[in-house]
Image (cartoon, rainbow, N blue to C red):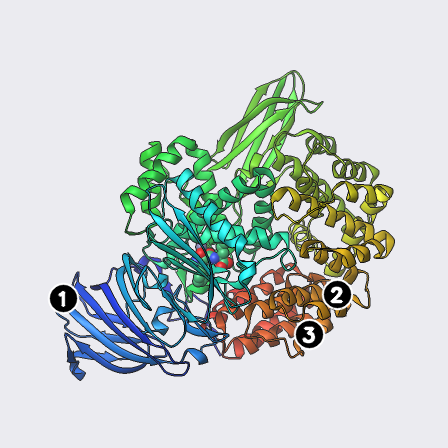
Amino acid sequence: MRDATPEQTPETVHLADYAPVPVTVTHLDVSFQLDPKATRVSSRLTCKRQGPGEMVLNGEGLKTLSVTLDGVPLDADRHTLGDRTLTLHGAPDEFLLETVVEIAPADNKALSGLYMSNGMYCTQCEAEGFRRITWMLDRPDVMATYDVAIDSDLPVLLSNGNERAAGVWHDPWPKPTYLFALVAGDLVATSDSFTTMEGKDVALNVWVRPGDEDRTAYALDALKRSMAWDEEVYGRAYDLSVFNIVAVDDFNMGAMENKGLNVFNSRYVLASPETATDADYANIERIVAHEYFHNWTGNRITCRDWFQLCLKEGLTVFRDEQFSQDQRGYAVQRIGDVMNLRARQFREDAGPLAHPVRPESFVEINNFYTATVYEKGAEVIGMLRTLIGAEAWDQGIALYFERHDGEACTIEDWLAVFEEAAERDLTQFKLWYSQAGTPRVRVTEHFSDGLYRIDLAQSVPPTPGQPDKQPMVIPLAFGLLDREGNESRPTEVRELTTAGDSLTFDLAEKPVLSILRGFSAPVILEFDRPDADRLTLLAHDTDAFCRWEAGRVLAKDRLMRAISEDAEFDAGWLDAVATLAQDDNAEPAFRALALALPSEDDLAQSLHEAGIVPDPERIHLTRRAAQMAVAERLANALPDLRAANATPGAYSPAAEDAGKRALSAGLLKLQTMRDGGAAARRVYDTADNMTDRMAAFACLLDVGDPDVAAQFEADWSHDRLVMDKWFMAQVAHATPVDAVGVAERLTKRADFDPSNPNRFRAVIGGLTAGNPAGFHRADGSGYAFVTDWLLRLDPSNPQTAARMSTAFDSWRRYDADRQALVREQLDRMAAADPSRDLAEMVARMRAA
Ligand code: BES
Ligand code: ZN
């Protein structure tokens, strides 16, 4: 059993210990003789000494057949072949190192390295998967050009770069191992082309299994829009003659930015109106853009080491969010991104897994592809832009591309270009990269004798390993409204840099403060203020984020008081919600967001922070009661409102129609609370697209419709991606009492294949994320069920097991009995000799 905390385990890697390699690799010649059980990988590394020391190559699970240096087999005294290292003693200044190894892709269920999925060969090398393919310096600061030859009978043989002959690829751009990719299979492409602003013609292909060709159009379209956008907005053009995207069914993550050969989880490529929802389309658009944008932010300029992960991920998320805002509308996209940040990153920051945007140590790097590195990393960049202004931002990023093209960089390199461009010292700003925890900003207002004063106080809570914090630079965008709701002072940005500060204004009457406009900093605002002000903002604020936020704060306040004090839902609040829902001047997507109540998890966290121990069942029931109250208030208006937001004609995934469908779905949920599912049944039976069908399916599951699950299955059992939705929805929409039983029953089906991460996440994640009251059942059955499955998956796929284990990271919020039940399961996992991945997560969650 492993009892050490991550800090004490011998495998812990520290940022402070970074040292460049003594011998680097500048070119790699690698050939593959593909075979499911015995693939032979022959590689020739062009090596060059850069300093004193031994060359230590990485390898994992390789059957080593030969090692030669400059054509001569290596004597025993000139190398040491370890389990996971190959050390060369006294290597010359320049040499060729050749190795031949054998691996078994068909046995690789970890989906890292070279593996098989439905008869197709596929690789995933980030972060440290290349070492499972052949001996190499498997670290991002070693950048080499590649020649790859693939020997196989399969018709389609792909790798990075440009194709020189069938199955022979050359990548002229030096890259780290993690960007290597190989795909071989019976695949078909949907093709197109793009001419770059530099006049280069690029062939574009989306490769899928035969039969899926009719679902590739949207991904291809998103790719072309991404290419044009990166040219327009960042001046970045593509740099090879081909860009390939491959869809694979078995994939741990969403997608991967391998140079010229992006590999995607098929759920983020394949879409047709009949099988994909609006959310799927939005995800595809965003992820295609994200991986494409990595070509500059990640591939051309990469990370020196994995501690710098946010250098590429935070920046690329920032860029894909900008892209989505441009494609879909700023306000709605921003609100959605903030909701996601709060749901995942604020939660992470508030618990035992809190860590800085740039962590300082890790055991398993795969455990640090987190909401903090990604989403908070993107927010930090947004703040940087706000602080230095758009012009200095544009100059700084241009300088970054110019100065660091072809390099492996650090956050210091990144900040230096903006310090130069803005002529500003960013020392205090850099705390955003090193201090974990979500800052709190307390706002108090005072008005007397024509003087309006805002007092601001900040604090950053303690997090694991960081008991004391320094004040941060917090950009606060704000504006003022008069009592009638007219904007009396437009948006400006002030910086809070000390523990406390004040702003004063000479005004005849007390204004309504609209603060943290556009969510200008990833902080929690503590602002006790009159409801009247919130209602004014909800009705009139020009800043869409603050307008939405005012409604959210009102709703949360009502829900929390109903949960903790049995308070009634007052007419004032219900009227405001109803008014906005019916406000034809607001766009439907915004109204849909305003109609949605805070999630059960959000409420649990807020109650905990208010010193109230959350009861998941009570939260669930109260939230439903609130929905019912809204439904009653809107009652007779619901059918007409739905009709007014119908989307007749052919399905279009564009934001405008998607917004109407989102509002209709919210309204249908309310209507279902009143009619027992009659309207939802009509929608289900007549829907011509998966968005409407899934919305109705969820409603019918909510009311316990006895037939709908079987009907859905009869229609869709042939379709893996649609069936993932079916699995998940049944667990998420089961009553809390039934949820574990439903999940358990589903795992017994023949088509529940836990080695497929999408299917595993559908059922296990359907419980942990989709049905919190069921997961947190007081008898502990949810905790035991999830632990059983994590332990079953861990030996074959530690990465996904470790990722899913984060479901337990909120355990300290709950009552002593639940805490004891979770601790029992964490202890059980720790004692089960888990993978390094899962062991690290469990140790961190137990420690705090
Ligand atoms: N580089 C990552 C994929 C990755 C993550 C590989 C972890 C290995 C380990 C990729 O660029 C990425 O970030 N993908 C995201 C989606 C994106 C839109 C945020 C993913 O896969 O979830
Ligand atoms: Zn990424």
Instruction: Where is residue 383? Give x, y as percent.
Output: 47, 39
Amino acid marked by disc 1: Glu
Amino acid marked by disc 3: Leu
> Who is closer to the viewer here, 218 or 792?
218
Q: Which residue is mark 2?
A: 734
Q: Dot 3 lies on which element?
A: helix
Residue drawn where x is 70% and y is 73% of the image: 781
Note whether residue 463 is visible.
no
Instruction: Where is residue 527? Give x, y as percent.
Output: 64, 37
Disc marking residue 94: 1
Note whether residue 84 is visible.
yes
**Pair 3/2: label in front:** 3
The answer to the question of whether label 1 and label 3 lie on touching residues, with beta carbons closer than 8 A, is: no
User: Looking at the image, is mark 1 or mark 3 earlier in the sequence?
Assistant: 1
Disc marking residue 307: none
> Who is closer to the viewer here, 141 or 319?
319
Left or right position of 429 against 266: left
The answer to the question of whether label 3 and label 2 lie on touching residues, with beta carbons closer than 8 A, is: no
Q: Which residue is mark 3?
A: 746
Amino acid marked by disc 2: Ala
Instruction: Where is residue 303? Give x, y as percent.
Output: 34, 54
Residue drawn where x is 56% and y is 64% of the image: 806
User: Looking at the image, is mark 3 or mark 2 earlier in the sequence?
Assistant: 2
Q: Dot 2 lies on which element?
A: loop
